[in-house]
Amino acid sequence: MPKPIQTYGEFWPFYLREHSLPVTRRFHFVGTSLGLATGVAAVVTGRGALVPAALVAAYGFAWFSHFFIERNKPASFKYPLWSFISDFRMAGLMAVGQLDAHMERAFANGEQGTGANSLTPAQQAQPQASAQQAR
């Protein structure tokens, strides 16, 4: 059994490895965006009933991607606060096009994600390289 993660500095690369597939990250981005927009709408309109909808949107997209695409358990089950923070951090880095460097560093020492479908950035690039060579 792996030892529990003690610091956020250790958690961030783990979190990224748990989101190794680009489609998983896209589902998170959509869920986070919808959840944030719905949460803002709840505050602006004073409709507190929208808060559960915001949570369902955000976590629904994320958990679907973990269970059915990446095939691992969401990090939020074990590390809820760090996962919440990291989801916004990952979405922000995606929005400004700076996530790839973080992904490369997370996989640099040869570690893998825990999902049955997890891939390293190098493994993800292989099919693209093969397709380009075939042309």
Image: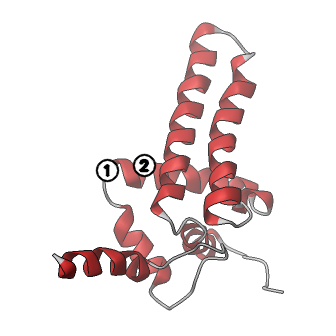
Amino acid tagged 1: Val
Outermost residue to the right:
1
Q: Compared with residue 22, is residue 9 higher up or lower down, i.e. above or below?
A: below
Q: Compared with residue 32, is residue 127 higher up or lower down, i.e. above or below?
A: below
Res 35 quadrant in image: top right
Tag 2 residue: 92
Q: Nearer the viewer, residue 112 or 88?
A: 112
Marker disc for residue 73: none
Rounded to the nearest whole Å, what is the CA distance between mark 2 and mark 1? Answer: 6 Å
Q: Nearer the viewer, residue 130 or 46?
A: 130
Q: Decide: few, some or many residues near mark 2? Use Cα within 10 Å; few <14, some 14-19, many ≥20.
A: some
Q: Secondary structure at mark 2?
A: helix
Q: Decide: few, some or many residues near mark 1? Use Cα within 10 Å; few <14, some 14-19, many ≥20.
A: few
- Left or right: 65 in relation to 96: right
- Left or right: 106 in relation to 2: left
Amino acid tagged 2: Gly
- Marks 1 and 2: in contact by CB < 8 Å? yes
Is residue 82 something that shows in the picture? no
Res 19 quadrant in image: bottom right
Res 117 quadrant in image: bottom right
Q: Secondary structure at mark 1?
A: loop
Q: Residue at horizontal 35%, vertical 81%? A: 126
Q: Residue at horizontal 73%, vertical 56%? A: 76
Q: Nearer the viewer, residue 109 or 63?
A: 63
User: Can you give x and y, in whole percent of width and height, for residue 37 in the image?
Assistant: 53, 26
Marker disc for residue 96: 1
User: Can you give x and y, in whole percent of width and height, for residue 50 in the image?
Assistant: 69, 19
Outermost residue to the bottom:
109
Quarter of the image that includes the C terminus: bottom left
Is residue 10 something that shows in the picture? yes
User: Can you give x and y, in whole percent of width and height, for residue 47 in the image?
Assistant: 69, 10
User: Can you give x and y, in whole percent of width and height, for residue 46 in the image?
Assistant: 66, 9
